Structures are given as C-alpha cells and as structure tokens.
Amino acid sequence: MNIPGLTIRSFSTASRVLSHVGKKPIKLYEGVSYTVQEIPSDFCRTFRRANQTFVLDRQVVIEGPLGKLRTPIPGFVNIAQDPVTKNLLVSVADPEVKVQRSLWGTYRTLLSNNVIGTSEGHLAILKFVGTGYRASLEKDEVTGGDVVALKIGLPYTPKLKVPKGLKVSSPSPARLVIEGTDKQQVKLFAAVIREFRKPEPYKGKGIFVNDEKIVLKQRKVK
C-alpha cells in the first residue's frame, strides 16, 4: 500500500544475492558411479510443501569404494551427467516455482555429500573439555558391538551403542573420532553424544564437536 508523503525504506541496504548452489556440478571421483532407480509405489514416501504433496518415487544410488548410499528424490528433480566433464548435474523442472527452487540446492547438497561419503568418507571429532571428562570404547556383552562409555561428571556412566555403518575410535581419552559414509548419521551420532554435556559458557566445559567454539561469559558478582 502506497501512502502519499511516506517514504518506505528497506531494512537492508544490500540487494538479495542467490547462492545458486543447485547449479553447481558435482564431481564424480574415480571409482564412484550413480544410477537412478524407480521406487515401487507401495514404498514411496511423501512430503508436503505449500499445501502440495510430493511423492519421492525415484532414488539416486551412489556407489563408491566405501559403500553405497541411496537418496530418494521427487519427480521435479532431474539428474544428468555432463558428457564432457562427466560431472553430475542437478536441475528442477521449473526453477520459477518457489518449492522447486528452494529444494534444488538441498538435493544437490545431499547428492554431493553422498559422493564424498562413498569415496572419502565423513568424520566428526568430539573433544571432551573438563576435569576428568573422557570417553572409552567397550564391547557389548550380548551383541559384541562397540559401545561408547562417557565419563562426564554424571552420577552414572552413559553408554551408547555405535550405530551400524559408523566407526568410532579414540586416539586419546579426551577425543572421539566418528567416521562413516552417511554424513547425516555421522553428525547425528555426534549430536546425541554432545547432548549429554553441552558446552557451558561460564567455565567452557563440555563436549565440543569439530571446531565448535563458545564465547565465555563473566559470572555475576552479588
């Protein structure tokens, strides 16, 4: 609505700049291949955006030296390979549609993470900061699988089973390294461990993931 004599000023002086992540090609490393497969209708998942329902009726299978990962995609996402560079190209049916444009970069990033995961792998490094804070690896007495035991000042010792597909090592008592092909699972397990002792801003103690840093606060003196 235009009001005579009233000047409308934008909150931001900079113009909007789009990232165009979806247009960036995905480099297929040596030994990594991809296929697009149809998903039977009985096993298709759906999601809603802007009062519209989209069906994930296809999946992109990325296979490399470290394993195989699958990414379900909706019908408006197209996958192709550049005949010259052999890079993977991701596009959408209509970039002018807001839903397709917003998910374009998301699916491109998911596929890029899978290419890196199946060729090089993903990792998360957890640092335990605090007096006596440490982690150790144990074996489950029933299944024989790996278990992470946390000693972080609690009246009990939390023990977490390492999810299938992940590898956990402890180069030192105050360090944990989580490795895997699926970036989401690697970061999720790191977040689950961090939840037991989040970094606090007064003494700087807690479980830090990768290069996480916090700003220390000064205690109030009464």
Image: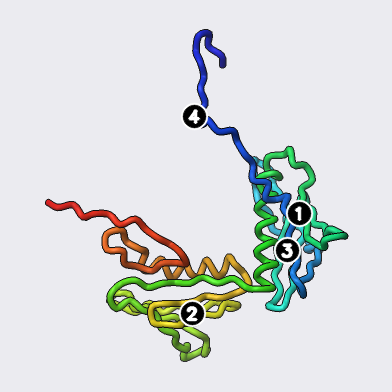
Query: Which residue of the protein is positioned furthest toward the top in this rendering?
Result: 4
Q: Distance between the residues labelled 2 and 4?
A: 49 Å
Q: Earlier in the sequence, mark 3 or mark 4?
A: 4
Q: Which of marks 2 and 1 is nearer the N terminus?
A: 1
Q: How far apart are marks 2 and 1 (CA)?
A: 36 Å
Type of amino acid at the residue the image marks with label 3: Phe
Name the residue: 65% across, 64% down: 113
Label 2 Cα crowd, 10 Å radius (few <14 / some 14-19 / many 20+): some
Residue 210's x, y, as percent?
A: 47, 67
Q: Name the residue under label 3.
A: 43
85 or 189: nearer the viewer: 85
Mark nearer the viewer, 1 or 4? 4
Tell me the element at label 1.
strand
119 or 51: nearer the viewer: 119
Question: Residue 132 lies in what quarter of the image?
Answer: bottom left
Label 4 Cα crowd, 10 Å radius (few <14 / some 14-19 / many 20+): few
Q: How far apart are marks 1 and 3 (CA)?
A: 24 Å
Q: Earlier in the sequence, mark 1 or mark 4?
A: 4
Q: Is residue 219 left or right of residue 86?
A: left
Q: In which quarter of the image is the N terminus?
A: top right
Q: Mark 1 points at which residue?
A: 90
Q: Which of marks 3 and 2 is nearer the N terminus?
A: 3
